[in-house]
Image (cartoon, grey):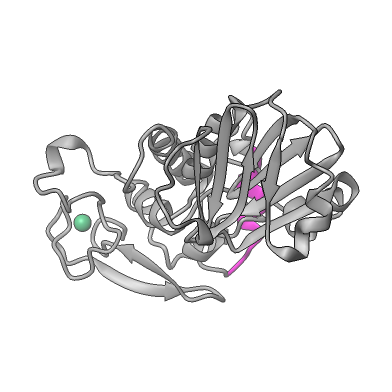
Amino acid sequence: MAEGHAVARWGDALRKLVGERVDDIRVPPRWRERANNIVGSRLTLVQTHGKHLVLHFSSGWVVHTHAMQYGSWQIGPLGQSLRKDARFARLRLTTPVSDVVFYHGPVMEVLSLEELAAHERFISLGPDLLHDDFPAATVLAVVKAQGDREIGDVILDQRIVSGIGNIYKSEGLFLATIDPRRPATSITAQELDVFFAELIPLMQAGRYVYGMTVTLPPDLQLEPWMRNWVYRRRGQPCFVCATPIQMIRQGEFQRATYFCQHCQA
Ligand SMILES: [Zn+2]
């Protein structure tokens, strides 16, 4: 699942290609005419914000992507063998030395800079917790202003903080011992501090690891499938207190939240 840490990792890999000239770009028919403006120009900037990734080119056009839950990137040398069928590629671009593929991504659009600057979803994003200048201290007021909304729903809202997905939401609230059902307005500065202090290093570490999202420390990973404290562990004993983990659904989109009723009381 593409949470902010995976997008940051893809961004890191793509930044190594800055300066390379695009020789060919393949996109769905809807975007083909616009994409022609990118051929012959150079990659100038790779921007990541939460789960959004934007490639900027010297011709003034950008490619805006959002991987949602299924999209992924493959970034390698020209001539690399694809790890998925090429028909799943929503975007493929090649330079004299590199091959970049974006698979399954539900959002892939070729935009002008003006369109990106007016892109409702992109410009309404809250601060990215993986950016160095993440203003953790200012987020509290925004969270509290959500009133009775449950914190497990609020913290997933990309307009408030961007980058947290469903796994890190449950894991972060568990590590900060915050009950996900609590109203946002009841969260204290200290609790939110602990939440970010636990979560940000975990996500920064996840940025450099491929594969499944692991949040458990190595000494608790007794079996290969033991990866997380509470995520997808409904009914199994809490690693701290042995209370069965619960699952509830929260928010407009009824996203699953896992928690320990005892540890997060
Ligand atoms: Zn517990």
Farthest residue in the right direction? 114
The image shows residue 219, relative to residue 172, as above or below, that is above
Q: Residue at x 30, y 44 (%)?
A: 215
Q: Which residues are magenta?
A: 138-148
Nearest to the observer: residue 80 or residue 104: 80
Q: Main secondary structure of the magenta part?
A: helix
The answer to whether residue 234 is left or right of residue 192 is left
Nearest to the observer: residue 17 or residue 249: 17
The image shows residue 79, relative to residue 262, as above or below, that is above
The image shows residue 196, relative to residue 122, as above or below, that is above
Name the quadrant containing residue 179. Answer: bottom left
Instruction: Indicate whether residue 147 is drawn in magenta.
Output: yes
Nearest to the observer: residue 81 or residue 117: 81
Quadrant of the image where one finds ligand 1: bottom left
Percent x, y of residue 239? 15, 52
Q: Residue at x 38, y 66 (%)?
A: 257
